[in-house]
Image (spheres, rainbow, N blue to C red):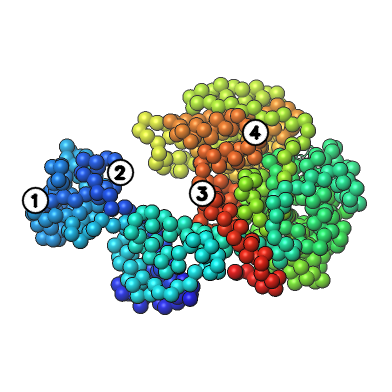
Amino acid sequence: MKLAEIAVPATRVRGVGPATAKPLATLGILTVGDILAWWPRDWEDRTVRLPLSAFESRSKISVVATVTGADWFGYGRMRTLKLFIRDDEGTVAELACFNRPFLERQFPEGSRVSVYGSFRRAYGAIQSSAFEIELADDSAGKVLPVYPLCAGISQAQMRKIVSNAIDEYCRGIDSELPEPVRLANGIPEKGDIVKMMHRPESLADARAAREALVFEELFLFEYAIGARSLARRGRLPAPEDAGSRRDSAGAAHQLSPLQRRLIERLPFKLTEDQLATLSDINGDISGPYPMARLLQGDVGSGKTLVAFLAALAVVERGGQVAMLAPTELLARQHAENAARMLEPIGVNLAFLTGNVKAAGRARLLSELASGGIDVVIGTHALFSSGVSYRNLALAVIDEQHRFGVLQRSALQEKGVGGESRERPPHLLMMSATPIPRTLALSVFGDLDVSVIRTMPPGRKPVKTHLSRAGNEAKVYDFVRRELDAGHQAYFVYPVIGEDEAGYDSEARPGESSLKSATEMAERLTASVFPGHRCELIHSRVDEGEQRRIMEDFRAGTIRVLVATSVVEVGVDVPNATCMVIEHAERFGLSALHQLRGRVGRGEAQSYCFLVYSGNLTDEGKARLRVMHETTDGFALAEEDLRIRGPGEITGIRQSGYASFVLADPIRDRETLERARVAAFSLLETREPREHGGSP
Ligand code: ADP
Ligand code: MG
């Protein structure tokens, strides 16, 4: 039996009564299987005993000492016990026993005790109020699990419950892995792994168990990816999938008539990479398998146009296209571009968001269902339950890392079962968050990947300046000159209003608190740029108002747009030449890169000012330095991987592409690699009909 299949109710475990069953249920723990798989988030190593004098060397220490006396302080109900202890070096400490008056009798003077806790120096004494205490003989010095908890259940209770569950039920649990794979990779039996996680002999044991679970998880993930690839295109993922075929020369010949017409009408030529990507896509669309392609291209590299061209190939074959954007703002911008580019060549367009109401909506839905609409652009409303398509043949997902897997497959399923279709629609996912190449194969292994690296010609790289808070007057003066010359500017802040800015827990006394977008919009309007129209936009501004503001900014009547990171994705206003980001240290590298990508979209030289404040951490410094030195998104992603290391790359963590319990594809990238090799070689040796979702 597998761990997850142990369906015995949790209440059968000793120590789980009605009072604890409730908080357990809150945590989602209903069965014995759930208890056993309630993995510790960390471990406390009490095997290392330290003298009290070392209390500052770690946040918590484990000491053996003798109780030398007790005292009471405070009055009435606040009366609190204080125990005095002395260790073998003669160092003395005080234990403040809040709500634990019973400790006085439990540990009388002379008791040998083992204490684990965090100590600090106060009023000249070494003190602790957060500690655990037991008789020294009872504690041989253990490694104890630390569990995620919720109200109503303590760490000690959880330890007891899990331990009881192990004693009673931890026999004969099957590994998730096929036996040969388990043995070949040195993975212990599942029951042993469970014990090592919850009751390790040493930290090394605990870590080995964790590593084994990570391997299990990643193996299953890679197996699923491999199986999906086999199902879709009859073969396993290969390294060549993670790069375009780069056939820009051949591409021109295989353009469809509508694609040709759109390209002829453009005021510019497609870049080589756009052409090569289009060739990849055309190949997929006319090929035998449904497309599942990830288009990676830096901000401003022209992905939207490629998506429109892909849409045309599908429309010409009588199919419908749904194009999904993460925000209403972006969906509307795509719809406007489509109206300019696609409508004149005869494509029927529609725009659908949650805001399209009543009569208009009903008509639109019926036209989608009857096939009167060729291309529909919108937000997640596109895959809500009332929406059906006659023949959805292509789903385009812009800024794909903003969507979860479930949302994506919901959209794809709209295509299955539609009239005359027996296969899922083609899928084109676009992302400006580059995934380091080394990871692409494992993480997006069941997809084909095209990359647009080159920017449209004539773009000048954005000049980036760093500026310490306090010197921003110079930045404002510079921006004023750009505004006077007819250009536009963005100002971005980390928070919307003062309500949030006030709760700046990191602000130290004397350090100025956060500037908010709301407050700064007023200040910039009133005293910094009085001659230029400034407006404020953020997620709490109502959507109609957002639209009006974006239209006015695009038209140039609004000169300065003060915003939060809502402007991060996709907004395209070529006349804007300045991006000022204040409290830049608050933004992640990829957010900064996305924000900077809002400028440098026209002919004129553009500038990005990163105004930082406070004392930068080393990581913060490194991040700003990288922003200063490179404008290449792929190089930036590699740097991000280097600086932040484990688990912080937005593209994967937030991709929702896979949700792991313990594994982290970046931190565990070596395990990921091993798991992929193991999973793919297993798939290779199996008969085709055996390719199910699980090994
Ligand atoms: P992103 O890849 O970030 O989504 P967009 O699709 O918004 O970028 O394109 C950015 C801008 O570049 C748009 O204004 C678009 O019209 C323009 N553009 C796209 N392709 C080209 C090209 N080959 N030459 C010149 N400009 C282009
Ligand atoms: Mg875009």
Label 2: how many Cα within 10 Å (few below 14, some 14–19, many 20+): few
- Horizontal side of residue 350 vs 464, given as left or right: right
Between the residue at mark 1 and the residue at mark 2, the CA separation in whole angstroms equals: 26 Å
User: Which image quarter is the C terminus in?
Assistant: bottom right
Question: Which dot, 1 or 3, sits closer to the camera?
Answer: 3
Between the residue at mark 4 and the residue at mark 1, the CA separation in whole angstroms equals: 66 Å
Label drawn at residue 631? 4
The residue at label 4 has a CB less than 8 Å from ligand 1:
no
Residue at point 70%, 43% (across, down) = 297
Please tell me in which quadrant of the rendered image residue 228 appears: bottom right
Between the residue at mark 4 and the residue at mark 2, the CA separation in whole angstroms equals: 41 Å
Nearer the N terminus, badge 4 or badge 1?
1
Disc 3, disc 2: CB below 8 Å?
no
Please tell me in which quadrant of the rendered image residue 476 appears: top right
Question: Which dot, 4 or 2, sits closer to the camera?
Answer: 2
Res 296 visible: yes
Which residue corresponds to mark 3? 667
Nearer the N terminus, badge 4 or badge 3?
4
Between the residue at mark 1 and the residue at mark 3, the CA separation in whole angstroms equals: 48 Å
Label 1: how many Cα within 10 Å (few below 14, some 14–19, many 20+): some
Towards the viewer: 198 or 627: 198
Which residue corresponds to mark 1? 69
Label 3: how many Cα within 10 Å (few below 14, some 14–19, many 20+): some
The residue at label 2 has a CB less than 8 Å from ligand 1:
no
Label drawn at residue 58? 2
- Where does residue 321 sit, x and y in percent of width and height? 78, 58
Q: Secondary structure at mark 3?
A: loop
Question: Which dot, 1 or 2, sits closer to the camera?
Answer: 2
